[in-house]
Amino acid sequence: MRLKNIKGAKEKISTSPYIIQKPEDYKGNFQTLFKNDNKIHLEIGMGKGDFIIEMARKYPNINFIGIEKFDSVILRATQKLENIELPNLKLIRFDATEIENIFDREIDTIYLNFSDPWPKNRHEDRRLTSTKFLKRYDQIFKGKKHIIQKTDNRHLFEYSLKSFTDYNYKIATISLNLHDDKFDNIETEYEKRFASLGFPIYMVEVEK
């Protein structure tokens, strides 16, 4: 979900040490940015950063990159990171429709948390689990392909299951009510709100 535009957001995020200013310069070499050979996990559509910040705290031996296309949203994440040192976390202000232009065979896991469902049929290709996007991910995965999706939207979830399986992904884990199933789970900011209203949270983990 997009926040109201914040004046000067672009300039403010540019001063954050967590922001990668020219991600295309690191294409195929993001390990050099982190200065280690640890796995790289990517969240596409990171919102205000609750999930990826907590993941970076919990798993210091994994490198995390969050992508968000709106300046005013990613600004909130950089504000949360002030006075926090997480060397295994970087953020990119970028549109996922061009994701293959900044990564090349170096991502181990992709997180898709509460993505825009794009409910109209004519917008199918904009869904982050559409075949069009799955083909893009093929170009950025290092080896084994691993995607974890969470959503409150039943239609998007059902669509994604079909899209994944049609593209030869295998379902490793699935939940129709994530919080009741009590999986080890780090919540996003939207997840907390949806769950508090009683909405079931759907989750699927797929591999290929």
Image (cartoon, rainbow, N blue to C red):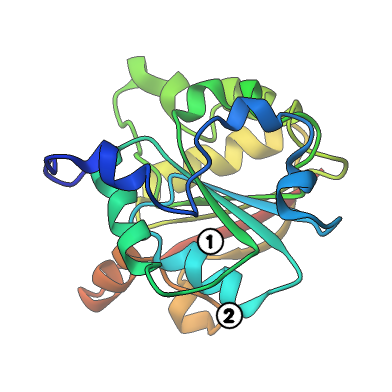
Give the percent coordinates (x, y) of residue 15: 37, 48
For marks 2 and 1, give the CA distance: 10 Å
Viewer-nearest residue: 99 or 188: 99
- Amino acid type, callout 1: Met
Of the 4 image quadrants, the one containing the C terminus is top right
Left/right placement of residue 115 relative to residue 104 reads left
Residue 38 appears in the picture as rendered: yes
- Amino acid type, callout 2: Phe
Mark 1 residue element: strand
The image quadrant that residue 189 belongs to is bottom left
Q: Which residue occupies 34% across, 39% down?
A: 116
Q: Residues within 10 Å of mark 2 (few under 14, many from 20)?
A: few
Q: Which residue occupies 46% across, 82% down?
A: 180
Q: Which residue occupies 69% across, 74% down?
A: 60
Residue indicated by mark 2 = 183
Viewer-nearest residue: 73 or 157: 73
Which mark is first along the chain, 1 or 2?
Answer: 2
Circles 2 and 1 in contact, beta carbons < 8 Å: yes
Dot label at residue 4: none
Q: How many marks?
A: 2
Viewer-nearest residue: 207 or 168: 207
Mark 2 residue element: loop
Residue indicated by mark 1 = 203
Q: Residues within 10 Å of mark 1 (few under 14, many from 20)?
A: many
Is residue 46 positioned above or below 23 on the image? Answer: below
Q: Which residue occupies 35% across, 50% down?
A: 153
Left/right placement of residue 35 relative to residue 56 reads right
Left/right placement of residue 174 relative to residue 31 reads left
Give the percent coordinates (x, y) of residue 125: 46, 20
Residue 176 appears in the picture as rendered: no
